[in-house]
Each structure stands twice: as structure tokens, then as C-alpha cells.
Amino acid sequence: MALTILDAGVVIAILDSSDIHHVAARQAVAFAIGRGDELGVPASAYAEVLVGPFRQGTKAAATVDAFLAALPARVEPATREIAVAAAELRARFGSRLRLPDALVVATAVVLHATRLLTTDAGWPALPVSVEVIGSSQA
């Protein structure tokens, strides 16, 4: 079974109907589910997704957690291997790949994900199949 990793921007866009990437994010994730892909969200991206809801209270954060469980999308832990891979990516790409993004990419690389969905069109060419939603890039 294929694995699709979701970057924080994709999950945030799905949850916010006013987000410019909302429709594209919903379509991309629905397509992945329709293909039978498993979905994963790196722990670092999950934390990023929860910041806004926690500003609204624990109930809002619990709603996001329930949403991810219903997708279903599992939260992937940041292991030592993922941390090393993220550090290597950050060293290789410098300022073109911030550490939070490197952690997401490293999760996809280490787990041998088929694809990584993101809303970030600014990433450099990476050692994983990146699909930028809401963009002509893929």
C-alpha cells in the first residue's frame, strides 16, 4: 500500500474553508484516499497544525485530532533516523529548506512515502515525490 505524507499546510487548508488551498487540498487528499493510500502526518507538522486550534482552546484542538483520526491519517513520530535525515537535508539545502520542512521531507524519505503533499511551492528539488497542491508544479 502506498503512503502519502501530508504537510501542515495541506491539513490547515482542509480545515479552513477560507484558505486559498482549501479546495485543492480536499481534492488531493480525497484522490489519495481513493487510490487506497495510507496517510501520514509528521509529528512536527501535527504540532504546527494544532497551534491555531489551541489558541481557540482545547476543544478546538480535540476537533482537529478527531478529524485526522477520521481521515484516517496517522501521526508519524520524529525518530532519531528522521532527525538525522532532516539535519542532512537542512545542511544540503541551507536556507532553501527550513528545519520544520526538512523534518516533513525526512519523514517521507525515511518511511519511503510514495508522495508528499504540500502547499509550499518554494521547496528545492527533493529526494521524494512532492506534489504542490494549488499549483501547476507537481
Image (tube, rainbow, N blue to C red):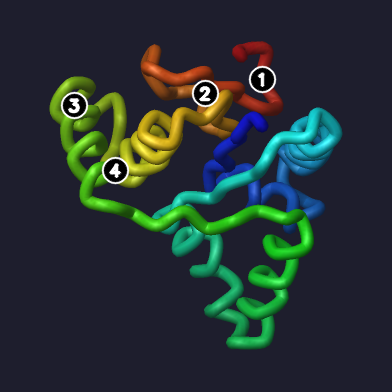
| Residue pointed to by mark 4 | 82
| Residue pointed to by mark 2 | 121
Q: Indicate the position of residue 84 as horizontal and vertical percent values.
A: 18, 40
- Residue at 61% x, 77% y is 61
Answer few, some or many: residues within 10 Å of disc 2's Cα (few below 14, many 20 plus, some between 14 and 19): some
Q: Earlier in the sequence, mark 4 or mark 2?
A: 4
Tell me the kind of residue under disc 1: Ser
Figure quadrant of the C terminus: top right
Contact between marks 2 and 3 (CB within 8 A): the answer is no
Contact between marks 4 and 2 (CB within 8 A): the answer is no
Contact between marks 1 and 3 (CB within 8 A): the answer is no
| Residue pointed to by mark 1 | 135
Q: Indicate the position of residue 65 as horizontal and vertical percent values.
A: 64, 71
What is the spatial separation of the Cα atoms under label 2 and label 3, in whole angstroms?
16 Å
- Badge 1 marks a residue whose secondary structure is loop
Contact between marks 4 and 1 (CB within 8 A): the answer is no
Query: Residue 118 or 80: which is nearer the viewer?
Result: 80
Q: Earlier in the sequence, mark 4 or mark 1?
A: 4
What is the spatial separation of the Cα atoms under label 4 and label 3, in whole angstroms?
17 Å
| Residue pointed to by mark 3 | 94
Q: Earlier in the sequence, mark 1 or mark 3?
A: 3
Q: Nearer the viewer, mark 4 or mark 2?
A: 4
What is the spatial separation of the Cα atoms under label 4 and label 2, in whole angstroms?
22 Å
Q: Is residue 122 left or right of residue 64?
A: left
- Badge 2 marks a residue whose secondary structure is loop
Tell me the kind of residue under disc 2: Ala
